[in-house]
Image (cartoon, rainbow, N blue to C red):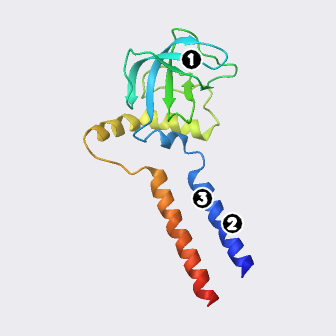
Amino acid sequence: MKKRIFSMLLLVTFCFVQIFAAGAPEDLFADTAQLFFGKVQFYETNGSITVVPTDVIRGDVKIGIAASYDENAFVGKDGFAPQTDAVYLMAFYDANNPLYVFQISSTDLSTMKLEGAAGVPMWERLEAYLNAGEYAETALADTSGSSSVPVVVIGCAALFVLIVLIFGFLFKRAR
């Protein structure tokens, strides 16, 4: 019986990992996420960066107002480091994550390529969402008053139901 319970818990754990792994592009659909083009105003190699948003794709971002971030992550060709006055794609999830700075081929969302994204499924999905205009469409829907349930909430609810069913089944059989 203990082996069966351990096996079920192990299975649930693997399911949980599969549900939430590599969801970075999908997390940008959250109401608190910010996705924008920004010009680098100041960058220090210790990690501090100041950017001025030039165009908003989604999120509560003020165009023309400088914002500083203590943590950042750069996505681009090998050796990529941002240059002052250059425009990049920026993604910010929340205060628990860094500002992602993407090296891009252009600011035209329909044809833009993320440099260094090839072979990295997470960034390839981000590029596909951007090219298809899905972030901009979701931002418009968010302003029209409709609310969306984040994928994480749905995943947690499904996981909870699965755990309840498994334990119910195990305890029923143990009697």
Instruction: Answer few, some or many: residues within 10 Å of disc 1's Cα (few below 14, many 20 plus, some between 14 and 19).
Output: many
Q: Any mark on residue 49, and which?
A: 1
Q: Which mark is residue 10?
A: 2
Q: Secondary structure at mark 3?
A: helix
The spot of residue 42 in percent (x, y) is 55, 11
The answer to whether mark 3 and mark 2 are in CB contact below 8 A is no
Measured Cα–Cα span from mark 1 to mark 2: 42 Å
Q: What's the residue type where badge 2 is placed?
A: Leu
For label 2, count other residues whose C-alpha is less than 10 Å away and answer few (under 14), some (14-19) or many (20+).
Answer: few
In-front residue for pair 128/53? 53
- Mark 3 and mark 1 lie on one chain; the one further toward the N terminus is 3
Counting residues from the N terminus, which is met first, the one under dot 3 or under dot 2? 2
Disc number placed over residue 16 in the picture, else none: 3
Decide if residue 40 is on the left or right side of residue 79.
left
Amino acid at pointer 3: Phe
Rate crowding at label 3 as few (under 14), some (14 to 19) or many (20 or more) other CA atoms within 10 Å: some
Q: Quadrant of residue 111?
A: top left
Please determine whether, in this image, residue 34 is positioned above or below residue 165.
above
Q: Which mark is residue 163?
A: none
